[in-house]
Amino acid sequence: MAERHASSLAVNTRKSLFCLFILTSTLFILSWFFVLRSTGSPHFIDHKLLPNSKLLAMIDNGISGSESQNDVEPSVGNRSILVDKEEEEKPTISSQDKEASQANNDVKCNTNGKLALKVFMYDLPHEFHFGLLDWKPQGRSVWPDLQTKVPAYPGGLNLQHSIEYWLTLDILASELPNPPNVRTAIRVQNSSEADIIFIPFFSSLSYNRFSKINPHQKKSNNRLLQDKLVKYVTAQQEWKISGGRDHLIVAHHPNSLLDGRMKLWPATFILSDFGRYPPNIANVEKDIIAPYKHVIKSYVNDSSTFDSRPTLLYFQGAIYRKDGGFVRQELFYLLQDEKDVHFTFGSVQKDGIKKASQGMHTSKFCLNIAGDTPSSNRLFDAIASHCVPVIISDDIELPYEDVLDYSEFCIFVRTRDALKKNFLVNLTRSIGMDEWTQMWRRLQEVQKFYEFQYPSKEGDAVQMIWQAVARKVPAIRMKLNKSRRFSRSYVRKEKGLSRIPSPSNFW
């Protein structure tokens, strides 16, 4: 009897445990069901517990209907990538408060609420920059007082490579008591705070004015300046820390910095093209292409039409060139007898610039053919004239092409095709009024991106170049951080200290 009772008790116990298991499992499944259901709706997401909560909050707002897609300002490709995250969290302030803040010279952000590029600029002796313009310093400062007088840059063809002049002026202007409202880049006095370190050497001007060797010299003044520059820069603590990777220098003329570039190559170069650089010294991944300063007058209030520009194709310039410039000579023979094509030799002499302006303003298409190097100022003269550029240069690199689609306002032709009989004239004649007008209008829209001026203005060439520099900063930082992976540990080892494991050893 006792055995039967014990057996019955065991069966009942097993049944109770089984029921308890079923009940527990059911509750567990139901709890997961409700969790999944709640996470399926953005309204039940606890943003504080998840990464990228701002992004989730934007998605939440979009789905709930409180803010439509059209209300969200789209990203603009040609703006600086350095976003001020703190600006998003600040409460709304009145216009009077904003004016007071600007009057307080808050130069950390530009007018678009973006973080300005922070530039540390060496106080190089005046002989490297404005001294090349025959400017002499007053007192201890090596820089001109821009509130009194801005040193003038020489005209003519010198202007086309004057990029370093405009960038230096813009950095100096950021320190004025009332700096210009547009501040894509600002100068900082502590190099540890800087995004980039600028070397203000007027290399193109140095080449143009001082590259000839005088009878009593073994080296030109241009070469001597480069030697002094290399010695000065490589001795700086900033260069030693980074190996020059976070430095920036302008060498826009293809022959500028011809000797110094071989020793300063870790720096980021601002160039017109890569025609005279080996790829290990300069390349599109490391360096920046900047536009020439156009030398013909901009076409202001352009009301021309397809029919009011009678010339089909226009080219005026040096025809016989070295290296890749042989194409000009071949095209001259192919096009010289075409009735609606203007293809002649021209120079800046005898009103050459004025004649070129008139010719481009009355032409539908303007030829930009490779010269001694892949690039030419003629492209930017054409843009300023709203004359649709026809680019014949297989190795050309273009300014801001990471954010700008040149196919919207330029025609690209491979060299081998351009040299085929009747190819160019047939191609350009096949482009009708509607297509040409669309490109002509786009030229008017992008023209400001190629205008150099002081003070700089929103979206002009100076601002666009600084923004291109800002887009290089993350890659520069990544290279610097990678280069430091083992540096500290091996320095400590050499000093007889215990080796500190690098972060990679923990994974």
Image (cartoon, helix red, strand yellow):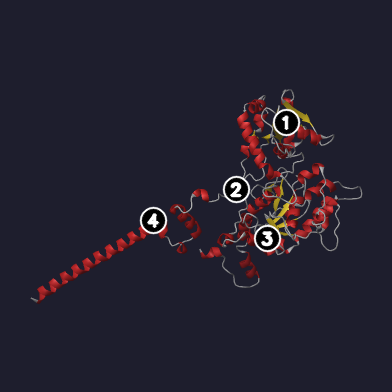
Residue extending farthest bottom:
2
How busy is the neighbourhood of tag 4: few (under 14 within 10 Å), some, or many (20 plus)? few
Q: Amino acid at mark 1?
A: Thr
Does the residue at mark 1 contact the one at mark 4 (Cβ under 8 Å)? no
How busy is the neighbourhood of tag 2: few (under 14 within 10 Å), some, or many (20 plus)? few
How busy is the neighbourhood of tag 1: few (under 14 within 10 Å), some, or many (20 plus)? many
Q: Position of residue 316 (x, y in %)?
A: 76, 32
Q: Amino acid at mark 4?
A: Gly
Q: What residue would you read off at disc 2?
A: 77
Q: Secondary structure at mark 3?
A: helix
Ranked by sequence position, the earlier of labels 4 and 2 is 4
Ranked by sequence position, the earlier of labels 4 and 3 is 4
Q: Position of residue 374 (x, y in %)?
A: 70, 39
Q: CA distance from mark 4 to mark 3?
A: 45 Å
Q: Amino acid at mark 3?
A: Gln
- In this rendering, the answer to whether 399 lies above or below 308 is below
Compare residues 425 and 218 and report the one nearer the observer: 425
Which mark's residue is nearer the viewer, 4 or 3?
3
Q: Which residue is at a point 10% across and 77% down the rendered structure image?
A: 2
Q: What residue would you read off at disc 4?
A: 40
Ranked by sequence position, the earlier of labels 3 and 1 is 3
The answer to whether residue 250 of the structure is visible from this angle is: yes
Which mark's residue is nearer the viewer, 1 or 2?
1
Compare residues 40 and 397 and report the one nearer the observer: 40
Q: CA distance from mark 1 to mark 2?
A: 32 Å
Q: Amino acid at mark 2?
A: Gly
Q: What residue would you read off at disc 1?
A: 362
Q: CA distance from mark 3 to mark 2?
A: 26 Å
Q: Position of residue 153 (x, y in %)?
A: 81, 48
Which mark's residue is nearer the viewer, 3 or 1?
3
Q: Secondary structure at mark 2?
A: loop
